[in-house]
Image: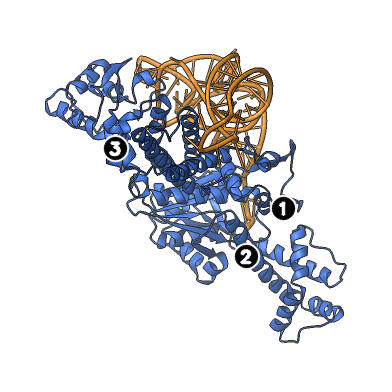
Amino acid sequence: MRQRLEGLLQQALTRAKEGGALKLDGLPPLIFEIPRDASFGDLASTVALGLARSERKKPLDIARIIVDHFEDAEGLLANTPEIAGAGFLNFRFSSNLWKRCLIDLERDGCGIADIGRGRRILVEFVSANPTGPLHVGHGRGAVLGDGVARLLDATGFDVTREYYINDAGKQIDTLAASALARLRQAWGDTCDIPEDGYPGEYLVELMTEQRAAATARIAAALGSTPPTDAASALELLRSHPAVAARICGELSAELLLARIVDDMKALAVEMDLFVSERDLRDRGVVGAALRELETTGFLYESDGARWFRSTDFGDEKDRVIQRSDGELTYFAADIGYHREKLSRGFDELIDVWGADHHGYVARVAAALRALGSEADRFRVLLVQLVRLTRGGEPVRMGKRSGEFVTLREVVDEVGADATRFFFLMRKGDSQLDFDLDLAVKQSSENPVFYVQYAHARICSISRQAQKEGIGMPAAESAALHRLTAATEQELIKALATYTDTVEEAAREREPHRVVFYLMELAGSFHRFYNQERVITEDRELSEARLYLAHSAQRVLRHGLGLVGIGAPETM
RNA sequence: GCGCCAGUAGCUCAGUUGGAUAGAGCAGCGGCCUUCUAAGCCGCGGGUCAGGGGUUCGAUUCCCUUCUGGCGCGCCA
């Protein structure tokens, strides 16, 4: 919608400049906004207000100049732009222009602009350690990352979705020790899991289930025959704890990752790539990154450790990348990983992290700068943790206690659509209260149904129309000028802002804007539906309304697809 | 103590790179189905945009400050 008007306004400014009426040193931003009050027109621009200072003229005078140079050869506007208030330019659309807006929606992808132009973006998200099932917080990150990826995809970016597997380091060691203890327990041993191990029930189930397979794998690694009774199995596990732990760690990480993948799939989230930390280390990626930093002089030794000079790029303090005991830090691995991302030729890197890691942003950004990347090629989207409540009572979560409501439980309870919708109803960096009782209800309080219902209603109208032999008119021949009722006008306007909304959401990487738009569009449709009948005796009017309803259906389906939610034909 | 994010209606939250009279959902009250799906629609009430100062034609939006909440500040991951 904005796009349609931008050209005209730009031309007026150019003419004014050529005629010497305006100086226009730089390209002024053409800011359009939808006026709150319909009496101010359909679209307003504040460009005259913005130019006041640089032109050293009164906003009203500038507005006058712009209007004087304004030409509308195609009759897109209902009248010449009005000047109002301090210098607003108010534009009122002609039915001709509204029609074009609706026709635009018929193009591929609803006519959304190609703002990406094929730029390659890597979106890394979830990346949960394979040490347990996903919890609700992971789910929010998964849905946000996936939503951003879908948005970028729809706006012409070449998107890759990636999951980084932390399958090396301490957490995996802890998992290995915990899994081994559970395996021994499964054979009847009375041993405890380690002090700060993973106490969750899922590991008990997993290792009980995998008792024979895990033990056989350990035996195979040791070159011995698989034990058949509990006594010899325990004998094997006790006499070779290191090998047993390693195998237990590998096996459980493998199976837990498979479970994570399955949990994401249940939420309609799928990755293009999985990158293993261990694999990166084995390939020498981390070492290469550190050597590069060494060569370029960003590393130094102090107190027996090696530090990265992250303060050179705005971090609060320098960070250790190799401890005095020779062990590389987690940060070192992350530097390697991000350098490897750059080496794959992406134009931009997006990481979705839990907000509790925000202190980490500056150092990774610093590392990327040190490796030669521009500052704006890396962006972190932070997701606040989810506060889960049930019956008003907060549900305690956390791997420490081993008791938490898993993402899978929530999805099984309320469905993928509602779960995604709830997660995307809030801005990523604001806290989210997820009321399970509310989400389970599947009643009118649950807004996802409100939007889906609008879509299903339109499908129902289509079926009815078909039954009565009323066909969809071609866009050009539809009598859209007959759609003059207030609810019809409101619906047309809502539809016309769709592409603007999507483009804005993509630019800001904020899928929640699409969700809010869909709720508003659904509201506009429901009001229209209640006010006017689509199928009437008046053939021409019926077809025009049918065309309008179909436009709404197309946008609803597209928008729901953008946030990964189904568009049901019946409910 | 320092840093990041937040504070908007009873509750949960939007608020379009600073714009015109600050919005939605839920909760509360009252209406609307012989007609395309009532999981819907219409109406009513509800605010010191946490407080204070500054920047300017104009501030919920930007800057400073105070208060409150969450998180982060390790040779942990």
* Type of amino acid at the residue the image marks with label 3: Arg
Q: Chain of mark 1?
A: A
Q: Position of residue A336 (x, y in %)?
A: 49, 61
Q: Position of residue A497 (x, y in %)?
A: 38, 35
Chain (orange): B
- The residue that mark 3 highlights is A100
Upstream in sequence: badge 3 or badge 1 = 3
What is the tally of numbered marks visible in this picture?
A: 3
Check if mark 2 and mark 3 are on a common chain.
yes
Q: Nearer the viewer, mark 3 or mark 1?
A: 3
Q: Nearer the viewer, residue A457 or A233?
A: A457
Q: Nearer the viewer, residue A473 or A132?
A: A473
Residue furthest left as drawn: A19
Q: Is residue B42 above or below residue A300?
A: above
Chain (blue): A
Q: Is residue A495 left or right of residue A130?
A: left
- Residue at mark 2 to residue at mark 1: CA–CA distance: 19 Å
Q: Chain of mark 3?
A: A
Numbered badge on residue A523? none
* Type of amino acid at the residue the image marks with label 1: Lys
- The residue that mark 1 highlights is A399
- The residue that mark 2 highlights is A258
Residue at figure coordinates x 50%, y 71% from the top left: A283
Q: Position of residue A493 (x, y in %)?
A: 38, 31
Mark 3 crowdedness (10 Å alpha carbons): few <14, some 14-19, many ≥20: some
Q: Is residue A477 above or below residue B59?
A: below
Q: Nearer the viewer, mark 2 or mark 3?
A: 3
Q: Mark 3: which secondary structure? A: helix
Upstream in sequence: badge 2 or badge 1 = 2
Residue at figure coordinates x 32%, y 51% from the top left: A117
- Residue at mark 3 to residue at mark 1: CA–CA distance: 55 Å
The quadrant the C terminus of chain A occupies is top right
